[in-house]
């Protein structure tokens, strides 16, 4: 069974361990100043029972009805033995293995209005 969980945070001081205040998945949402830069982090975890080939992540920027502002967060990469892997790829096999959590990030400029996830 494949099961992927995505936990999103905003401006997390420690992206691997966001606090409840930094959590972007639940209400109430964090208030952000319009025009400032928001740093979004995404912890993508495999909670299923099989490894998953995972190549991309897509964010609708809190506006599901408007696809023009959608974006793809980038993987947080590390180099090991001359090859590049996601920082959470513990065995460096390019798959999100059962129990692994991979880190992605993106920055956006804050716009007026509430964001929805």
Image: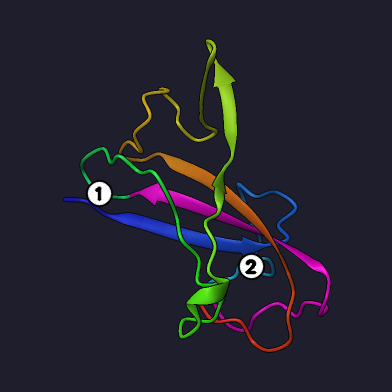
Q: What stretch is highlighted in magenta?
A: 26-46
Mark 2 highlights which residue?
20
Residue closest to the far front: 68
Foreground: 52 or 106? 106
Q: Residues within 10 Å of mark 2 (few under 14, many from 20)?
A: few
Mark 1 highlights which residue?
48
Please say which color scheme the image uses.
rainbow
Q: Name the secondary structure under disc 2.
A: loop
Q: Which quadrant holds residue 23? A: bottom right
Q: Measure how far apart labels 2 and 1 are at the Cα level.
A: 25 Å
Q: Name the secondary structure under disc 1.
A: loop
Foreground: 100 or 58? 58
Residue 77, position in %: x, y? 58, 33
Q: Residue at x 70, y 48 (%)?
A: 14
Foreground: 17 or 25? 25
Residue closest to the far top: 81
Q: Residue at x 50, y 60 (%)?
A: 7
Tell me: residue 111, above or below residue 89.
below
Q: How crowded is mark 1: few (under 14 residues within 10 Å), some or many (20 or more)?
A: some
């Amino acid at each position: 069974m494949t099961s992927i969980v995505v936990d999103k945070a905003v401006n997390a001081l420690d992206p691997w361990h966001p606090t409840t205040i930094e959590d972007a998945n639940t209400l109430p949402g964090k208030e952000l100043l319009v025009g400032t830069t928001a740093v979004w982090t995404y912890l993508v975890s495999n909670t299923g029972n099989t490894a998953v080939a995972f190549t991309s992540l897509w964010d609708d920027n809190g506006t599901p009805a408007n696809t023009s502002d959608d974006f793809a967060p980038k993987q947080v990469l590390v180099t090991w033995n001359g090859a590049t892997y996601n920082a959470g790829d513990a065995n460096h096999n390019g798959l999100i293995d059962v129990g692994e959590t991979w880190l992605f990030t993106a920055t956006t400029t804050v716009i007026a209005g509430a964001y929805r996830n």
